[in-house]
Image (spheres, grey):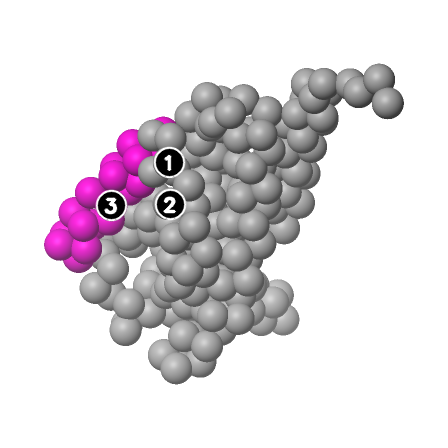
Amino acid sequence: MDAIPTAFLTTWVLPVLLGLGLASATGLRTFLPLLMLALAAKFEFAGVRLNDQMAWLAGWPTIAALAIAATVEFAGDKIPAVDHALNALGFVTRPVAGAVAAGSVLWSMDPTVAAVAGVIVGAPAALAFNAAQGGMRAASTATTGGLGNPVVSLVEDVLAFFTAILALLAPILVPVLLVLLMIVVFRIGRRLRMASGGAAPVSDG
């Protein structure tokens, strides 16, 4: 009797939670979570498995391409103007990356069902965190004139990395992790907006 819930947990629940966590991380960084997933699958880290149609993700050519893309994204996001272009592009690329990340780990499902589930689970999660990031970045730009954006970008790098690594290691904690992550992102954005409002000149009326 105990084996049934355990099998259900490991076959269905944990892969969905893993996909949700990775997709959320792609809302902050498009390529880093996918790179971490590809490496985890390649070296069978934490028991990560990919469905058959996504096995190419763990190939060395894909890993090399993702490593280059993640490096370019990391560096480009620290450059004024380039970071805004990346964020604008992210509204398209990050939901796609989220759908790929979520769908690829649903190894027990039919490939078509896994792809659809990946879109349903991954794309909205990535888009939500990308929107939250956009608000945080806009507040930073308004507060510092863009000078503080590289610092905010580094914070986002750290959040994306730890979200992905915790999803890989402990997917059961993903719901709690995502609530905490959203609180952190919104609080940073709120503080930046408050700083922007406090810095505005006061009119004598």
On the rendered structure, is 76 left or right of 118? left
Mark identifier at residue 173: none
- According to the picture, the residue beneath numbered tag 2 turns out to be 85
Residue depth check, mark 1 versus mark 3: number of the one nearer the observer: 1
The residue depicted at 19 percent of the width and 55 percent of the height is 62
Residue in front for this viewpoint, 117 or 190: 190
Identify whether 74 is placed above or below 172: above
* Residue furthest to the front: 205
Kindly report the distance in space between the C-alpha atoms of the residues bearing marks 1 and 2: 6 Å
Circle 2: residue type: Ala
The question of residue 199 being in magenta is answered with no
Q: What stretch is highlighted in magenta?
A: 59-78
Kindly report the distance in space between the C-alpha atoms of the residues bearing marks 3 and 2: 15 Å
Mark identifier at residue 69: 3
The residue depicted at 31 percent of the width and 40 percent of the height is 73
Q: Position of residue 16 (x, y in %)?
A: 51, 63
Residue in front for this viewpoint, 12 or 105: 105
Pointers 1 and 3 in contact (C-beta within 8 Å): no
Quadrant where the C terminus is found in the figure: top right
The question of residue 63 being in magenta is answered with yes
Q: Which of marks 1 and 3 is nearer the N terminus?
A: 3
Dominant SS type (magenta)? helix
Circle 3: residue type: Ala
On the rendered structure, is 43 left or right of 6? left
Residue depth check, mark 3 versus mark 2: number of the one nearer the observer: 2
Identify whether 180 is placed above or below 78: below
